[in-house]
């Protein structure tokens, strides 16, 4: 599968009673599709999968599968703390119709690289899916090393890596070392333009939930070869992206959705609400994006 374009790492809307609000979800999907996104990535960390039951995760995957149109890319988050659970979540995604999953290292356990290699091999052996690796060591406590990527570089079912370490040098190393083998996927939003320059043709993007048109315009403008305008767009996006990276990422994205007239509810505990000062800071940074032409 060739990964291309902006692929929202989807939030999950919740109603006042705490249940998933599928009416708000439908409006949200329609809004992002109109902006030009190329597919959907449900049940990632931006979607608060860690707070959901297996039944809720199944319902989200089925909902997005039903909403998807022909040609839109579908990648299911199927992460869990243990290999057995990851296999179960991946089997569920496959039965619903997802042929590709996004998998970070299992959180909390801090596996060694050899343990992590066996983990991914076990998933590939158990379920006929392709995998996009997900590198976010600050969140998961484990890195995806070059040793691991070397191991899977010639496996056609390990198709890409969402690189969220924040290290541009590492992204350049990945793009150079695995060209034609493992696709570099932008996952460090505040340096997304740099990723594009170094070969990331796709962007699994949490911020696109609340700034879809701006993110899609940046992607389209870069691919059209207008680097000067793309640089100007990135400057406009940078402040809001940088604030998102500073903490309370999901809460700020959901607040950003509210600012654009698409309320999606609060986050589930342990994620708490934004303070008034945090809202004011993010609202100010979002102003040029909300008025995006």
Image (cartoon, grey):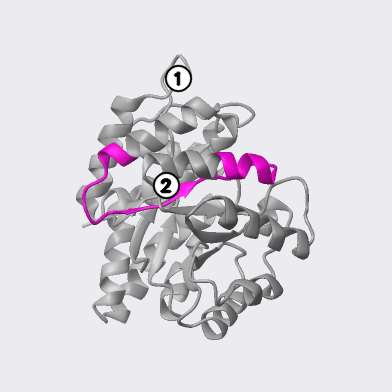
Q: Which one is in front, 263 or 46?
A: 46
Say which residue label 1 marks. 19
The magenta stretch spans residue 60: no
- The magenta span reads 65-88
Mark 2 Cα shell of 10 Å, populated few (<14), some (14-19), many (≥20): few
Q: Which quadrant of the rendered structure holds the C terminus?
A: bottom left
- Under circle 1, the secondary element is loop
Say which residue label 2 marks. 284
Which numbered disc, 2 or 1, marks the residue that appears first in the sequence? 1
Image mark for residue 186:
none
The magenta stretch spans residue 79: yes
Which of the 4 image quadrants contains residue 149? bottom right
> Residue lying furthest bottom in this view?
176
Mark 1 Cα shell of 10 Å, populated few (<14), some (14-19), many (≥20): some
Q: Is residue 180 above or below residue 16?
A: below
Asked whether, in this view, residue 252 is left or right of residue 104, the answer is left
Asked whether, in this view, residue 71 is left or right of residue 195, the answer is left
């Amino acid at each position: 599968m060739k990964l291309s374009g902006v692929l929202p790492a989807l939030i999950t809307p919740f109603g006042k009673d705490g249940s998933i609000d599928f009416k708000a979800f439908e409006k949200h999907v329609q809004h992002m599709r109109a902006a030009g996104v190329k597919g959907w990535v449900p049940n990632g960390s931006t979607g608060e999968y860690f707070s959901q039951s297996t039944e809720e995760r199944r319902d989200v995957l089925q909902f997005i599968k039903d909403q998807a149109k022909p040609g839109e890319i579908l990648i299911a988050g199927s992460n869990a703390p243990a290999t057995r659970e990851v296999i179960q979540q991946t089997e569920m995604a496959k039965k619903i119709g997802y042929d590709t999953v996004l998998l970070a290292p299992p959180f909390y356990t801090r596996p060694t690289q050899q343990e992590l290699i066996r983990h991914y091999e076990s998933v590939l052996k158990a379920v006929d899916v392709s995998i996009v690796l997900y590198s976010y060591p600050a969140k998961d406590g484990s890195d995806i090393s070059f040793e691991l990527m070397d191991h899977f570089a010639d496996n056609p079912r390990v198709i890409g890596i969402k690189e969220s370490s924040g290290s541009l040098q590492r992204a350049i190393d990945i793009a150079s070392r695995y060209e034609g083998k493992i696709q570099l996927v932008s996952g460090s939003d505040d340096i997304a333009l740099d990723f594009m320059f170094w070969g990331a043709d796709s962007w699994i993007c949490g911020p696109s939930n609340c700034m879809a048109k701006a993110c899609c315009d940046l992607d389209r403008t870069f691919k059209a070869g207008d680097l000067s305008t793309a640089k100007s767009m990135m400057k406009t996006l940078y402040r809001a992206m940088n604030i998102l990276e500073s903490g309370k990422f999901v809460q700020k994205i959901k607040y950003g959705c509210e600012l654009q007239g698409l309320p999606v509810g609060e986050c589930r505990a342990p994620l708490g609400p934004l303070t008034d000062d945090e809202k004011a800071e993010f609202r100010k940074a979002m102003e040029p994006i909300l008025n995006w032409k």
